[in-house]
Each structure stands twice: as C-alpha cells, then as structure tokens.
Amino acid sequence: MIQVKSFTPEIDLEILWRFEDRSMGQGRPSIASQKMAAKILPEAINLVKPVAYIGFFPVLGTNKRCLELENGLALTGGFIDRILGGAQEIAVIVCTIGPALEKHAKRYFDEGHPARGYILDAMGIVALGNLAEDARRYTEVQINQRGLQASTPISPGHADWALSEQQILFKLMPTSETGVLLNSSFLMQPHKSLTMVLGLGNEMITHADGSQCEYCPLVKTCTYRRIPGDPWYPSTYPNEEAPMKNV
C-alpha cells in the first residue's frame, strides 16, 4: 500500500540566492531581483502543492551491485550494494510539487517576462528540495519507530547510479498511484518531481553517516555536493573544506 503525505509549501529565498550565487558565480542578486522575488513569493507558495508518495518493498537478497526485489525486479549498478546492502526492505519515495508552478513560469516566458519566469522556476526547485527533505525525515521517523535504521537516500541519475533505473521505481510506484509520469528518456512529469530510495535494516549507512555524493566522480568539485547529515540542499560547499567521510 502506498502512503500519500502532503506537506506545507516552503520556499526559502536565502537558499534560492545562495544557489544562484554558486551556479552563476554572480554574487548577491540585484536589488531589483530581490524585490521581484519578494513580490512573486506569495504567488509561488500558492502554486506549489508538495506531495510525497511512499511505498515499502521487501528485499529478497543482495548481490554485488544488485538488490533483488519481488516479481523479478532488481535495482542494479553504481553503489547499490554499498549503501543499500543489508537492507531488509526499501522505501521508495516519489516527490512532486505538481504542474501548476512550471506552467505559470512558462507563461511568463511566453508573455515576454523571462526574469519573472526564471525566478519562479528557481523557486520551484527550492520548493522541491524542501519537500524531498521533509519526506526523507518523515519516512525516517516511521522506519525508526519500527526499530530499524534508514539509510541515506539515493536517487537515479545521481553519482553513478543510472537514470534508467527510474523505470524500476515506476514499476514499484506506478503512475496510476502517484500521477507522476515517466517518459522514454526516464524524465518525470511534472518536471519538478524526484525519486529517492532508502534502505531499511539494522546496520545501515544512515543519513548522518554517509551521502551518495561520496560515490560520485565529481565529489571533490561539485557545487551541490552534500556531506553526511546535510539536508537536500547542502549546508557546506566544497571550497568551505568540509571533510567527506569514507563509508
């Protein structure tokens, strides 16, 4: 049975500007941009509908780079065995803020207001990140109440786990249950959606102990690298010299 959990929309402008600074290398935004964002923020909050769909599935066995599930399904590749090895179950989470915000942002672009469209779209990314962290924490509490540990989350397309693994997650969490579509390129619609997998067991690499970023070849240089314990949006960046743990 798939759980459906709604969350309160959250858009932190400080996170927005911090990421814009890192991705664009332009420092703090102009006063005009800050005023525009403050004006658009209530509109963005009204357009965001944060929902997480959560399913729990038994693990039949773990081989190197492969997690065997029911009905002949398996998660394979990358660092699967390192983070999810030893899991008794997995939790699959599909997060989405819905289509309304991205449709409204597109309308701004189409009507000749690219700055508004860009800022609104960026707010959607921040809202999705907040939703992912809320959903991770909510699921982790449920797992801990069962006397089990929750692993740090991993997502297809991150580090060296192939994006094509999305198709396995969508067999477990079909569109008929979530309303989120997967296209032939393994991208989701609405676009402001994401998937996560957590392992459930007695001796997992918890979120406080590890991060999928540690298995990525860009671990030392990525602007968006997360250290163990970080929320979906990292609290520390590479040039701030936060040490990575070896897990």
Image (cartoon, rainbow, N blue to C red):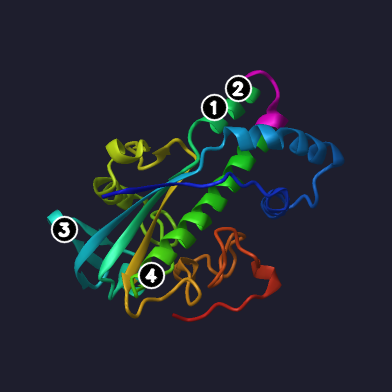
| First of labels 3, 4 by sequence position | 3
Labelled pair 2, 1 in contact (Cβ < 8 Å): yes
Magenta stretch: helix, strand or loop mostly: helix
Which residues fall within the magenta stretch?
Answer: 110-117
In the foreground, 154 or 40: 40
Where is residue 193 drawn, in percent x and y? 46, 43
Amino acid of disc 1: Lys
Instruction: Please name the residue shown 37% across and 38% down the image.
Output: 180
Q: Nearer the viewer, mark 4 or mark 2?
A: 4
Q: Are marks 4 and 1 in contact (CB under 8 Å)?
A: no
Q: Along the line of sight, which residue is nearer the eye, 29 or 195?
A: 195
Secondary element type, mark 1: helix
In this picture, residue 211 sits left or right of residue 82: right
The residues bearing labels 4 and 2 have C-alpha atoms spaced at a distance of 45 Å
Does residue 112 show up magenta in the picture? yes
For disc 4, the marked residue is 145
- In percent of width and height, residue 140 lies at 43, 65
Query: Quick check: marks 3 and 1 in contact, CB under 8 Å?
Result: no
Vertical side of 92 occupied by 43: above or below: above
Kind of residue sitting beneath label 4: Gln
Q: Nearer the viewer, mark 2 or mark 3?
A: 3
- What's the distance in space between the residues labelled 3 and 1, CA to CA? 37 Å
Residue type pointed to by label 2: Arg
Distance from disc 3 to disc 4, alpha carbons, whole Å, reads 24 Å
The residue to which callout 1 is attached is 103
Mark 3: amino acid: Glu
Residue 241 picture location, percent across and down: 67, 75
Tag of residue 107: 2
What is the CA distance from the residue labelled 4 to the residue labelled 1?
Answer: 39 Å
- Whether 56 is drawn above or below 201: the answer is above
Label 3: which residue?
70
